[in-house]
């Protein structure tokens, strides 16, 4: 091969799929693992990947998607930083006949024909698992004061993890969320917000952080305040990236709800199908578990990210 003259249209006689992927950013260990999974899986699947990092800004992601439309990619995949405000650009993609796959995070569009499928976790279920563990833990206690480190304001995992946790802890009236603020899913954000929480709240029993990174930031703030994370203040997080599981095994975190970032292989399979015009399910949910401190010790050597 290689001797044919290039023809004009998209594809140019070969059937390599081109995917435009608009990533949220590089805010967390989860995100780094997710990006690596997407890039490696594209390579393995023989898919030509155009990748952009939105630096946690919606406007950057919209720009990236518009440029993918202009470049006439075969499929667009993206992880929306927030849930709202995507209808216009998704309509542009639809009119250009470019299928869209939501990866990891959802949009709140009422018109579900704007995307082919949504691959990712059930964040409400994750929040519920976190809350259920705390309800167990809180039996026989008269007062359990919780501070919550929320993910990015308006992001599906922040909204849903808050909701799931609130639903599950309703069963135990002694559990009270006394402060709740965003740490933007970053370690430095978690640390800063936790420092402020420690200053203004004399009795904090539990931190519920929407991801490991913010929990790890909170550990730094708690230690700087002369308290023992995991003992004086219990910590629950979501993700189970390596650093989180390490802190869990070390006794500084008390419970982690897993959220799987390795979405690449499933994403490439779905991409091949939608490009061929095959039917795919509207929703593909990833399977996940939970870890206690004991389980963390056996899991740690197997942790891939
Ligand atoms: O939990 C967090 C990341 O959208 C599930 O984003 C993802 C979340 C993940 O920043 O660490």
Image (spheres, helix red, strand yellow):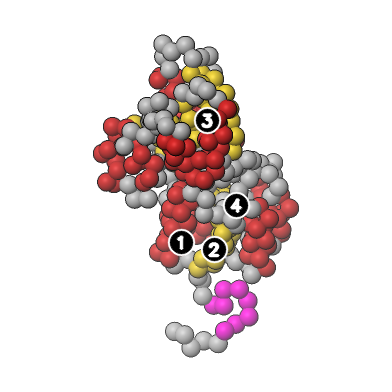
Mark before the other along the chain sequence, 2 or 3:
2
Q: Nearer the viewer, mark 4 or mark 1?
A: 4
Q: Position of residue 243 (x, y in %)?
A: 38, 45
Would you say the residues marked 4 and 1 are in contact, meaning their CB atoms lie under 8 Å apart? Answer: no
Residue 169 visible (yes or no):
no
Helix, strand or loop status at disc 1: helix
In the rendered image, the vertical position of residue 119 relative to residue 55, given as above or below: above
Q: Earlier in the sequence, mark 3 or mark 1?
A: 1
| Residue 8 falls within the magenta-colored stretch | yes
> Residue 257 in magenta?
no
Q: Quadrant of residue 258?
A: top left
Q: Residue at x 46, y 61 (%)?
A: 39
Q: Is residue 241 left or right of residue 76?
A: left
Instruction: State which tag comes first along the sequence, 2 or 4.
Output: 2
Q: For the residues carrying marks 3 and 1, which lies nearer the camera in this image?
A: 3
- Secondary element under disc 3, as helix, strand or loop, is helix
Quarter of the rendering containing residue 256: top left
| Sequence order check, earlier mark of 4 and 3 | 4
SS at circle 2: strand
Earlier along the polypeptide chain: callout 4 or callout 1? 1
Q: Position of residue 103 (x, y in %)?
A: 54, 50
Q: Percent position (x, y) of residue 63?
A: 67, 61
Between circles 2 and 3, the one closer to the viewer is 3
């Amino acid at each position: 091969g290689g001797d044919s003259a290039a023809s004009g249209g998209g594809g140019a006689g070969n059937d390599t799929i081109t995917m435009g992927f608009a990533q949220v950013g590089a805010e967390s260990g989860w995100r780094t693992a997710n990006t690596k999974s997407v890039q490696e899986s594209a390579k393995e699947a023989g898919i030509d990947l155009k990748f952009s990092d939105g630096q946690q800004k919606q406007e950057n992601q919209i720009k990236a998607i518009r440029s993918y439309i202009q470049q006439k990619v075969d499929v667009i995949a993206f992880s929306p930083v927030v849930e709202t405000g995507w209808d216009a650009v998704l309509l542009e993609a639809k009119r250009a006949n470019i299928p869209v796959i939501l990866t990891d995070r959802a949009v709140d569009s009422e018109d579900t024909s704007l995307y082919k499928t949504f691959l990712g976790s059930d964040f409400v279920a994750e929040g519920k698992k976190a809350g259920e563990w705390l309800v167990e833990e809180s039996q026989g206690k008269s007062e359990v004061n919780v501070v919550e480190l929320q993910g990015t304001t308006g992001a599906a995992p922040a909204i849903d993890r808050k909701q799931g946790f609130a639903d599950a802890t309703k069963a135990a009236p002694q559990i009270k969320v006394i402060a709740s603020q965003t740490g933007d899913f970053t370690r430095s954000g978690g640390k800063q917000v936790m420092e402020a929480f420690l200053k203004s709240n004399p009795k904090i029993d539990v931190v519920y952080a929407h991801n490991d990174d913010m929990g790890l930031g909170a550990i730094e703030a708690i230690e700087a305040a002369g308290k023992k994370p995991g003992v004086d203040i219990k910590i629950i997080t979501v993700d189970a990236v390596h650093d989180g599981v390490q802190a869990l095994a070390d006794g500084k975190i008390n419970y982690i709800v897993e959220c799987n970032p390795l979405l690449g292989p499933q994403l490439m399979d779905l991409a091949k199908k939608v490009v061929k015009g095959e039917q795919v399910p509207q929703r593909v949910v990833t399977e996940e578990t939970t870890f206690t401190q004991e389980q963390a010790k056996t899991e740690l050597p197997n942790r891939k990210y």
